[in-house]
Image (tube, rainbow, N blue to C red):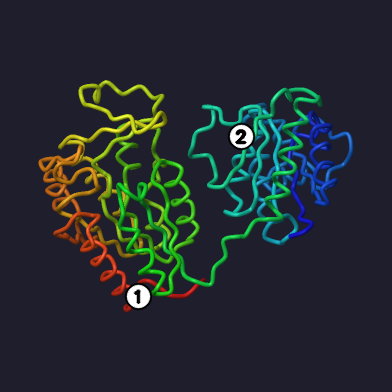
């Protein structure tokens, strides 16, 4: 789009100069703007396109009710709800093509809600005094959010903060001009993996599925990838999922920050999407390079994959717990689920001679899986390693049967 419209959101009672500067930068680059005030106590120096009263009303509330709550957190959550509702409405009607939101902790809290509600592909830029901060939990980040630190911008315009504001203005406008929204005329399959060497089934499955007329999106199961996968699944973005990489689940149980949130392995089933699931890499445990290892894992060796992540393996009892967690999470599914159990290994490193080779641990997981996966979940045992061609052959056989009986619909909704 040559001249997109960007929604500029912020508290115009305290940050009008900065917000006006952002809008001016966008307009100088031939973009259009629509402004939204999410203030509560004060008044904007000049009217916005969407007033704070309209924002509060969209949350079925009012500015007076927000003030009367006597609690700034409650008040801002009201504004966050209203801003999210209106932003989605404007995007769906084609009135805006991207959003930029400015704030400190309060404005960032609101911004994260707005960005979560807008679809994947809509440019979302947050200019914040706490960008990339540990204050922001990963699960609140939308899959394609962009952030820049609002350096030197706590109060008033200056040459330092203008550098951040102008970059953000150019970035969101450029993204809106360049973006190719995720629209396809082919049914989409969501697949998870962990790299392409640790798990390699996608190398054979992707071309085979594409030859059948499907599009395949593969998500890296290192926390953020799993969150993006779950978000799209919750929006019924897939006709089928092949969720074959589950280290994020084991990491969550272990207390690692390298997880995808507590709804991992839930959303596809709740959305009625048929699932083929396998426990790829569920024998591993990953911690962030900066994270202290919990005391219960201090007696086992850890390998530093790089300065960002370090890995070890789960013991027999922990593997049984992961099987139990899988079964519990999948039991809520509203569509068919088949769990594929590769009897000869779950990732490249657990092959004989590999650093994670542990036949007793694998046997414990297999034994527990046979106990906990009950109908309507179907357990399919495969006498192969997850990276063997035989595993992919079974996946395609099961998938083809689902296509043939209509479980997987080969149309785009």
Which quadrant of the view contains residue 394? bottom left
Dot 1: what SS?
Answer: helix
Does residue 357 appear left or right of residue 99 in this picture?
left
Which quadrant of the view contains residue 356? top left
Residue occupying the far right of the picture: 46
- Where residue 279 sits in the image (x, y, percent)? 26, 50
**Front residue (pair 41, 321):** 321
**Front residue (pair 186, 96):** 186
| Residue located beneath label 2 in the image | 109
Q: Going 31% across and 69% down the picture, which residue do you hit? A: 399
Residue occupying the far bottom of the picture: 404
| Residue located beneath label 1 in the image | 403
Q: Is residue 240 above or below residue 115?
A: below
Going from N to C along the chain, the mark reached first, 2 or 1, is 2
Does residue 248 appear left or right of residue 413 in this picture?
left
- Where residue 392 sits in the image (x, y, percent)? 26, 63
Q: Going 54% across and 41% down the picture, which residue do you hit? A: 141
Dot 2: what SS?
Answer: helix
So how many labels did they put on this image? 2
């Amino acid at each position: 789009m040559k001249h997109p419209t960007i929604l500029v959101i912020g508290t115009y009672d305290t940050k009008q100069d900065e917000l006006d500067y952002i809008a001016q930068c966008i307009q100088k680059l031939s973009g259009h703007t629509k402004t939204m005030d999410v203030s509560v106590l004060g008044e904007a120096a000049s009217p916005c396109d969407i007033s704070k009263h309209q924002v509060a009303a969209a949350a079925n509330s009012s500015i007076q009710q927000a003030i009367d709550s006597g609690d700034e957190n409650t008040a801002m959550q009201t504004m966050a709800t209203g801003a999210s509702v209106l932003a989605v409405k404007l995007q769906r009607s084609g009135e805006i093509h991207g959003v930029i939101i400015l704030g400190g902790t309060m404005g960032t809290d609101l911004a994260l809600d707005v960005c979560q509600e807008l679809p994947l592909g809509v440019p979302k830029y947050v200019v914040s005094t706490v960008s990339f901060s540990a204050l922001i939990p990963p699960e609140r980040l939308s899959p394609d959010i962009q952030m820049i630190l609002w350096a030197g911008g706590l109060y008033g315009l200056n040459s330092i903060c203008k550098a951040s504001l102008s970059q953000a203005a150019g970035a969101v406008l450029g993204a809106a001009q360049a973006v190719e929204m995720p629209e396809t005329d082919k049914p989409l399959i969501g697949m998870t993996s962990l790299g392409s060497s640790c798990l390699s089934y996608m190398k054979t499955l992707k071309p085979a599925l594409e030859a059948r007329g499907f599009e395949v999106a593969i998500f890296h199961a290192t926390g953020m990838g799993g969150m993006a996968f779950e978000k799209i699944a919750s929006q019924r973005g897939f006709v089928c999922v092949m969720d074959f990489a589950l280290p994020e689940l084991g990491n969550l149980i272990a207390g690692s920050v390298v997880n995808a949130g507590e709804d991992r392995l839930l959303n596809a089933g709740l959305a009625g999407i048929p699932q083929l699931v396998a426990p790829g890499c569920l024998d591993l445990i990953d911690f962030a390079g900066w994270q202290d290892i919990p005391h219960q894992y201090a007696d086992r060796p850890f390998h530093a994959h790089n300065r960002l992540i370090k890995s070890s393996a789960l013991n027999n009892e922990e593997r049984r717990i992961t099987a139990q967690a899988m079964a519990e999470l999948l039991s809520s599914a509203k569509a068919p689920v088949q769990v594929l159990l590769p009897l000869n290994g779950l990732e490249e490193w657990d092959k004989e001679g590999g650093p994670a080779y542990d036949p007793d641990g694998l046997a414990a997981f297999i034994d527990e899986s046979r106990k906990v996966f009950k109908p309507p979940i179907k357990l399919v045992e495969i006498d192969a390693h997850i990276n063997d061609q035989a595993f992919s052959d079974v996946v395609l056989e099961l998938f083809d049967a689902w296509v043939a009986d209509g479980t997987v619909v080969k149309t785009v909704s």
